[in-house]
Image (cartoon, rainbow, N blue to C red):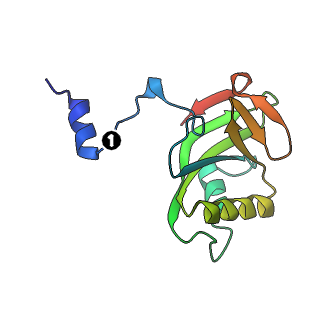
Amino acid sequence: MTTQLERLEKILGGKIEQRDARVIPGTVEVKGLRVVYFSDDGKNPSGKQFWNLTTHTNPHFATSGGVNERGCKITLPDGQLFHAVGYHGDLDGWRKDIEAGAKALHLLLARIEGGRLLISDGRAFALSDCKVEFC
């Protein structure tokens, strides 16, 4: 017998991630998708920070695809907070847009590699030493 969840997944064309089975964005490679984390500015809501970061360049370097918040934040052992964003399509263009926005806004960027969060200032932290929250 087909469950309601299975019917919904069939309609939507993919698996629905269960809350207790969430995967930290950037820990599993997804073809055509890149994940980067940006440091919280300590002043604005994360949505406004995302907007400022991703709309800084005009015109955009990216010529296709898009960027979105990934619903995950990571707090370092020292309390510094990072938010996840994912981008697809023109990967090089979106990377340039995000890097330019981060530079202009004086934000750090980070990526996950081998179970560690690598910060653009040279620091690295084991994910197991960080607090990960899904929002």
Q: Place residue 132 in its image quadrant.
A: top right
Q: Outermost residue toward the left?
A: 1
* Position above or below: 101 against 63: above
State the image coordinates of residue 38 (x, y, percent, origin top left): 70, 48
Q: Outermost residue toward the right?
A: 122
* Position above or below: 113 against 12: above
Q: Outermost residue toward the front?
A: 31
Q: In percent of the image, x 80 and y 47: which residue is there?
A: 120
Q: Place residue 15 in its image quadrant.
A: top left
Q: Outermost residue toward the bottom?
A: 59
Q: In percent of the image, x 82 and y 30: which residue is there?
A: 78
Q: Which residue is mark 1?
A: 14
Q: Is 5 positioned to the left or the right of 60 in the image?
A: left
Q: Amino acid at mark 1?
A: Gly
State the image coordinates of residue 18 (x, y, percent, origin top left): 40, 29
Q: In percent of the image, x 63 and y 37: which residue is there?
A: 73
State the image coordinates of residue 111 (x, y, percent, origin top left): 70, 42
Count of number-bearing discs = 1
SS of the residue under disc 1: loop
State the image coordinates of residue 8 (x, y, percent, origin top left): 24, 38
* Position above or below: 129 against 62: above
Quarter of the image that includes the N terminus? top left
* Position above or below: 22 against 49: above
Q: Residues within 10 Å of mark 1 (few under 14, many from 20)?
A: few
